[in-house]
Image (spheres, rainbow, N blue to C red):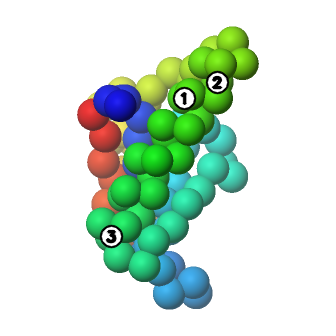
Amino acid sequence: MKSQYTIIIQWSDEDQCYVVSLPEWGEFCHTHGDTYEEALKNAQEVLELLIETSTEDDEPLPKPITLGQSSQLASTLSKSPDSTAVAQHK
């Protein structure tokens, strides 16, 4: 399933894994993976489930963050030493 939602992947020294944030879905929407690739795969699966569940429950989907908004988000994250990637998944 293609989506235009933001996937933020950061290494966590504390957890010793890659932690993924899905900001359009709220500040507590996270997943993780032992490798970058696993974290991305898990994020894609979570996004599919969130979209599917919201659609089935007739709930509105959050508006995807646009490139300009992503740049602001990236600027904020670049101040964090653990930041490794900000990507728009399409």
What SS does tag 1 mark? helix
Kind of residue sitting beneath label 2 = Ser
Relative vertical location of residue 48 with respect to residue 83 in this rendering, above or below: above
Mark yes or no: residue 55 visible: yes
Q: Which residue is mark 3?
A: 36
Report the Cα–Cα distance between label 3 and label 2. Answer: 27 Å
Q: Which residue is mark 2?
A: 54
Q: Do callouts 2 and 1 mark residues in contact (Cβ within 8 Å)?
A: yes
Density class for disc 1 (Cα within 10 Å; few <14, some 14-19, many ≥20) is some
Q: Residue 51: which numbered mark, if any?
A: 1
Kind of residue sitting beneath label 1 = Ile
Q: Depth check: 35 or 74 in front?
A: 35
Instruction: Name the spot of residue 79 as percent of width and height, x first.
Output: 42, 65
Query: Going 42% across and 79% down the picture, which residue do you hit?
Result: 34
Kind of residue sitting beneath label 3 = Tyr
What SS does tag 2 mark? helix
Density class for disc 2 (Cα within 10 Å; few <14, some 14-19, many ≥20) is some
Query: Going 59% across and 56% down the picture, which residue do you hit?
Result: 30
Relative vertical location of residue 25 with respect to residue 16 in this rendering, above or below: above
Relative vertical location of residue 88 with respect to residue 28 in this rendering, above or below: above
| Marked residue nearer the N-terminal end (3 or 1) | 3
